[in-house]
Image (spheres, coloured by chain):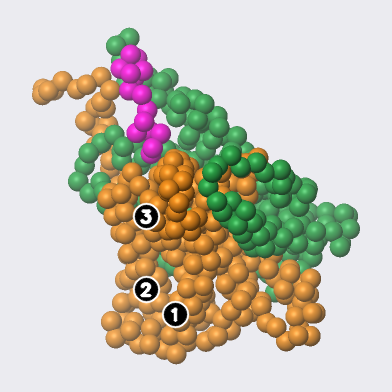
Amino acid sequence: MTGRPRAATEDHPLVKFALCAIAIGFIALFLVMPLATVFSEALAQGWRMAFDALAEPDALAAIRLTLIVAAIAVPCNMVFGLAASWAIAKFDFRGKNLLITLIDIPFSVSPVVAGLVYVLIFGLQGWLGQWLRDHDIKIVFALPGIVLATIFVTFPFVARELIPLMADQGRDEEEAAVSLGASGWSTFFRVTLPNVKWALLYGVLLCNARAMGEFGAVSVVSGHIRGLTNTMPLHVEVLYNDYQYVGAFAVASVLALLALVTLALKSLLEWQFAGEIAASHHH
Amino acid sequence: MSLAATAVPPPRIRSRSALPGFGLAMGFTLFYLGLIVLIPLAALIIRPWSLGFSGFWAEITAPRVLAALRLSFGASAVAAAVNSVFGFIVAWVLVRYRFPGKRLIDALVDLPFALPTAVAGIALSALYAGNGWIGRPLGHLGIKIAYTPYGVIVALIFIGLPFVVRTLQPVLADLNRDSEEAAATLGATRFQTFRRVILPMLAPTLLTGTAMAFARAVGEYGSVIFIAGNLPMVSEITPLLIIIKLQEYDYAGAAAVGVVMLAVSFIFLLALNALQAWAASRR
């Protein structure tokens, strides 16, 4: 073989080629093909059928419910993420690591267990079941339960992006602002928030994608009432189990598009603002 | 497990920061964490003991539960092992090589994080079913994937891949090349260098990523249930069993299985923290 000599830490071109082929093949088989299947099945009987499936009242109700749930759950977790990261990153106290671990718990718990805990509390035979029934309050099999389960599974997203970044940035700038007479709130809104805005957006983006796509936890608390308590992922399940494949994949492809948009924005944020998103990569 | 006892950090808080707002931020953080995560989890942990210890034990050692646990752990272990090999190759290729489409592949790795699990579930199911793009050719070879335990493994490979890749990537990028060069200078072949120098340096990180993929797989629900076939004793995963027990209004039974899954999550959370500390100390 001729050509330029390889550096000692470089792999043989054949090894390079083989490893690239394996990596691309694996990704094509396990990631690209399922994604392509979603769109191909949705359009199996043409665009018309796919759009008709999306315009059905039950589908529209599912889309609306998904938007409502995300519109409640995401801001709640955003406010929590900001409060938690302010307390954890800008102050010293005992038990900080324990608190960070506790915030991470929802990521390591099965989504089904996340739904289960709320059924055990608010379900008919749960701790508060009888009391809620007497007062005619519906939590499980209704919007509040779905929102609670969604908040649980998306709980750490924003906090996790903000804590390491804000800890990195320290508190010098805030202390300077306060010593110059700025109030706590205006320090937060004028100094801290602009410093973490991209990381916040990044966290909110991931939080929203998961909130709109959550299936397991919501499935436990929803009761699957068509047109009432079915979110988009649950509607996909109902249609699929009814053998309405075009409808199921049509709704699924809307969710898949949402995932692709999320990925594109996420990559864009990572390329543009790498330094301002400290904790990116790995969830 | 005394989670409830250790849940709230000790209130001995000393704040040396000159910034305001600690009380408010910390108060809200603990209130929200307690309300959404800790109290509901505590409610889960106490629930199954209404059966008594022997009742709890009988519940979690019932043949159907044991079969489900065996499948969940077995399939998760196989999927994590597959991901540790192919995830390593993908991470290696993305960090070390340059090839066309690299950025696209890099962004695609996060697809399983972004794609709702129900969408992944029906897509994989359609792909591997008897008339699917992959299922049909495999069927001619006499191999059945969908609606068997192998289908569970396929879904768990899908869901676990990004954990291995995203954990390895930053560490691989930071890896000190001096020791690789030294090994080459001392006459080691590239393969020897890989086995004796690179792999030992990356082992803790690889193990961390693999454990994350495993932990996620054990609790996974949405992507699995469509392709699994859900045959009791054969292809029924543990989270599904919780849902079935809930539908039968067997709250205590569902909680018993839920507590086992929660215990496994906590063991993994602790093990992963220890692993990450080890990995950091190795760098």
Indicate yes or no whether the magenta region holds residue A107.
no
- Name which residue lies at 43% across and 48% down: A180
Foreground of the two, B77 or A271: A271
Q: Of label 1 and label 3, which has the lower sequence position? A: 1
Q: Position of residue A213 (x, y in %)?
A: 47, 67
Q: Within 10 angstroms of label 1, few (less than 14), some, or many (20 or more) residues?
A: many
| Chain letter behind tag 3 | A
- Circle nearer the viewer, 1 or 3: 3
Whether residues under marks 3 and 2 lie with C-beta atoms below 8 angstroms apart, the answer is no
The residue at the far front in this view is A181
Disc 1 from disc 3: Cα separation = 33 Å
Q: Sequence order check: which comes first, mark 3 or mark 2?
A: 3
Please tell me if label 1 and label 3 are on a single chain: yes
State the image quarter where residue B114 is shown. bottom left
Q: Which lettered chain is shown in green?
A: B
Q: Which mark is residue A254?
A: 2
- Pointer 1 chain: A
Q: From which residue to which does the magenta span run?
A: B169-183
* Residue at which label 1 appears: A63
Q: Please give the residue where the numbered disc 3 appears in the rendered image.
A: A194
What SS does tag 1 mark?
A: helix
In the rendered structure, which amino acid carries the disc numbered 3? Pro
Q: Is residue B66 visible?
A: no
Q: Colour of chain A?
A: orange
- Amino acid type at circle 2 is Val
Q: Quadrant of residue B111?
A: bottom left
Q: Main secondary structure of the magenta part?
A: helix
Q: Position of residue A137 (x, y in %)?
A: 70, 83
Out of A254 and B70, give the one closest to the viewer.
A254
Task: Report if the CB atoms under discs 2 and 1 are less than 8 Å apart.
Answer: yes
